[in-house]
Amino acid sequence: MTIAKLLLVDDETAFLDAMKRRLTKRNFEVYTATSGMDALDLLSDEGEKVEVVILDVKMPGMDGIETLAEIKRKFPLVEVVMLTGHGTVPSAIDGMKQGAFDYLMKPCDMDVLVAKVGEAAAKKRRHEEKIIEARMQEITTRRA
Amino acid sequence: MSSQDIDRNEYYRSLKRNIFLIVILVSYIPLIVVSSGILYQMHAIHQEKTRIHLETLVKKHKWNIDHFLRERQDNISFIADSYRFDELADSARLAELFRKLQTTYGHVFSDIGVVRADGTQVSYVGPYLLESAQYNDAEWFQEAFQADTYTSDVFLGLRGFPHFIVTARKYKDGQPWILRATVDFLAFNDVVENIQLGQTGFAHIINRAGALQTRTAGRPVSTESAYLALFQKANQFSPDQIQSGTRQAADGTDLIYVAGLLKENQWALVFQQDLKDAYRDLNRTRNIAILVFGLGGIAIFTMAVVLSKGMITRIAAADREKEIMNQQIIESGHLVSLGELAAGIAHEINNPVAIMVEEAGWIEDLLEEETFHESENLTEFKRALTQIRKQGIRARDITHKLLSFARRSDSIIDRVDVNDLIREVVSLSAQQARYNNVEFESRLDEDLPAIQVSQTELQQVLFNLINNAIDAMDKRGGVIHVASWSNGDQVLFHVKDNGPGIPEANLHRIFEPFFTTKPVGKGTGLGLSICYGIIKKMGGEIKVESRVGEGTVFEINIPIDVRGATGAEPPAPVAKHAP
């Protein structure tokens, strides 16, 4: 049983590899994507499974903020943690305003990252539970 | 450095000289042209006026004298016409006539007599005993018998006293006789002697031989008759013509003379005066003008000196200001591009550092596995990995600072009381200051308005400045003076130390990122560039002044009612006014 299912999005494959290895070792199920488009494709395919997206802000092509907006539009329940180089703190804050769960500075401490992802996953699950509860209630009230 | 100063001083000296010369030239040339022009005109006009005045004078007197002579002539001619020879030869009758003459004309005639063709005076009335005097040898007698009327030159004659005579010739039985009268010399003299002007102007009469016909009241008159030329020109002029000119007297003084011919060009009335005397008024005016010119010249000279000195001081001050400004402009341009470069580098370095740190972390993760627990170098691996991570974090911190210099960071804008901030930072630094024997002095303006800035950022600036000041003074100690004040639009504060100062070569580089004079590992060289970035962001200015051996002062100003132009938050649409 994994702690959570993650999608790592970053244009640096070396960084992706290292992170994937470390996170996998910490009992996370890790998917990776090297661009915003890839991430969205992957979410469409495996949408149900991914709970938390770790998204680099600065990427060529579709950048982190645009990707975030798309994810939030198509998959509103998926939590997103922004990962930023230092120069892009303001855009990370923009990201928070657009519904990101939190942001982290790169390079980040693994324990902090694990904690953040855990919180994000928990929040997502809470949301899902509530939705399920609501649906159940709906069904039960309908029956009644 | 010093040679540059010498060049500059040389430049200012030559500039001062040029300004001085220009002022002098521009002031003096018109002054000289105008005053000499006026003086020349005045001189010419005055000369002309003097000449005309003298000519009028001489003309009038010439007419008077001519009139006087003609009148005397007419008196005698009238008597000779009116009486017969026999009547006049009778001394008693002549005496009666003479008396009448004197009652009518005053003592103009001193005596009267009748002379026959043989030169014997047949009758005589007068103060001298000249009855039966013989005149046939006298020069006047020869000439008198040639003409109907005759007026002689002045001569001594038998009486040994200067006089001249007037005669009228008549005939009795084909024999000519003459009535002669002596004109009282004193009476005649008065007419001429009364013509006096100034101290040296006087008139006299000469005859064709150049002999004086009047007294000159002891004044020197050229005896060799410088005026004889007057008679040579006589024919070219009408009788009323007045001649004038200047000449040099024997003793070298310049004279002006005006002359008119009298008595059918036999005599000349000459008025002469020293030029100096004649132009006395003019000369006085000229002297006043020269005095005024001299004083004006001195005033202009003084003004030129003062003006050029003042101007050079101003120019030098303006040059210095311009230089400082240029330096600031160069610096800010410099720093912007450096900031961008630094941000770019920080970004590019960040990713590889992140990967390295993650890979090191991965190895650490792997070392946790049991297979490695027996490895004898396990602790050494762990130590090395910890070091790699530590250095990675250090690299990250550096890029952090770099980026906060180059970019805006997410600071919260708040109302900040600069005085509180200063007190806080000073108290935090007090411990370190004590180790370095540094004392704090502060002069804070208690009425300082609050400003809208990021507290943490301003704190960082103050920390940097105060720490730099403490570091600058080493262990030798010193005083750090912190002051705050406001000029209405801005809040200003400064941090002043009396440390060793910053050499000029370094002064314009201190805000550059990575510029440091501290030993490797002690300073990143980012402190002041971060301060610079922060203060610029707040819309303020940071200035530095330093003198080697005297100390350094950093002065900062921050506008009161303008918020940091571009913070993390979008700028407010309306500028907030500090309460």
Image (cartoon, coloured by chain):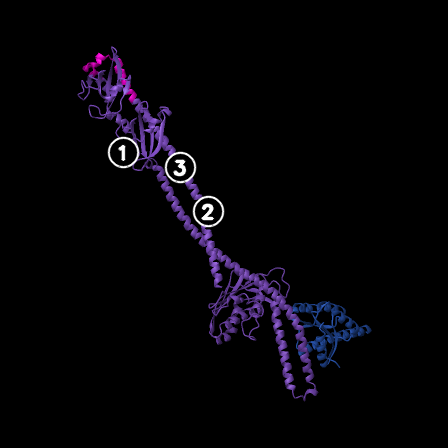
Chain colours: A blue, B purple
The residue pinned by badge 3 equals B42
Q: Position of residue B514 (x, y in %)?
A: 58, 70
Q: Residue at x 56, y 73 (%)?
A: B523
**In the foreground, B62 or B227:** B227
- Residue B42 placement, left or right of B516: left
The residue pinned by badge 1 equals B220
Circle 1 residues within 10 Å: few <14, some 14–19, many ≥20: few
- Mark 1 belongs to which subunit? B
Q: Which residues are magenta?
A: B69-97
Q: Amino acid at mark 3?
A: Met
Q: Position of residue B420 (x, y in %)?
A: 53, 69
Q: Main secondary structure of the magenta part?
A: helix
Q: Residue at x 68, y 88 (%)?
A: B373
SS at badge 3: helix
Q: Amino acid at mark 2?
A: Val
**Image quadrant occupied by the C terminus of chain A:** bottom right
